[in-house]
Image (cartoon, grey):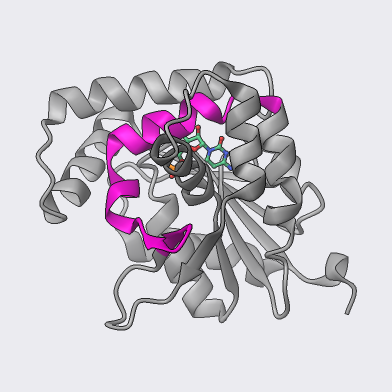
Amino acid sequence: MSSDAIPVLTIDGPSGSGKGTISRLVAEHLGWHLLDSGAIYRAVGYAAGMAGIDLTDAEAVTRMAESAKIAFRAARDGGDTRVIVNGHDATDELRTETAGAAASAIAAYPALRAALFDKQRGFRKAPGLVADGRDMGTVIFPDAPYKVFLTASAEERARRRYKQLKDKGLNVTLAALLREIQARDERDATRAVAPLRPADDALTIDTTGIPVERVVAAVLAVVRRA
Ligand code: C5P
């Protein structure tokens, strides 16, 4: 099968919109592969930081994106997928809002995004792919037959992130998270290249106050309806 014939479901949206959880559950349900593109941006920021690279140096960060070895590995205990960066399991470090903010800062560099283009397209493998990110439906897989854009109020998104990070034992405050998330979304939505926005042919689902199972069902319906 040519890779263009392999189905892709894109799930884009701002941080805390439920993309990560919904993408994982939908991919499991369909038996499809999963691309967590945000983890790639986080991993590049992390690798650059470890190498002592100044994150404002777009060229050096882009070179790091080209050379860093980023691998996803299923957790032995059935928990979250592990992200291995240059041989080191960086999963826990990548979850923090500091890693999210660093990812968002470097994600605005056009050359860096171009360097990651083929890497992300390479995840399109049979029997199908669920692709989670900001520009999956607009830039990376514009030809995807199924596209969803998840949103939720900023307060709810901050509450979800707060719970997620607290559950992982991280020390955060709700007010600080809300500020950080709003700043990150503002930067992601207003950058010149691949800004956060729904593809014209995406179905937008507002997940504020909606239980996870109902959102999963609504997303699966997009695939089944076709
Ligand atoms: O989804 P996640 O919160 O892990 O993404 C971290 C950051 O990476 C986002 O705030 C965004 O700036 C960037 N990103 C992106 N394009 C994607 C996925 C993530 O620019 N497809």
Which residue does the image show at 27% across and 54% down from the upper left?
92
Which residue does the image show at 44% across and 51% down from the upper left?
19
**Magenta-span inclusion, residue 46:** no
Figure label count: 0
Which residue does the image show at 49% across and 67% down from the upper left?
72
> Is 28 in front, or is 200?
28
Q: Residue most toward the right?
A: 2
> Is 102 in front, or is 30?
102
Vertical order, 9 against 208 (above or below): below
Numbered range of the magenta stretch: 83-110
Residue 215: in sight, yes or no? no
Task: Identify the image quadrant of residue 127.
Answer: bottom right
Task: Identify the image quadrant of residue 181.
Answer: top left
As drawn, is 212 to the left or to the right of 109? Answer: left
Vertical order, 153 against 78 (above or below): above
x%, y% of residue 4?
Answer: 86, 65
Q: Residue most toward the front?
A: 52
Which residue does the image show at 33% across and 60% down from the upper left?
212
- Quadrant location of the C terminus in the rendered image: bottom right
- Quadrant location of the N terminus in the rendered image: bottom right
x%, y% of residue 43?
Answer: 47, 47
x%, y% of residue 203?
Answer: 61, 46
Vertical order, 60 against 222 (above or below): above
> Is 65 in front, or is 198?
65
Residue 12: in sight, yes or no? yes
x%, y% of residue 100?
Answer: 38, 36
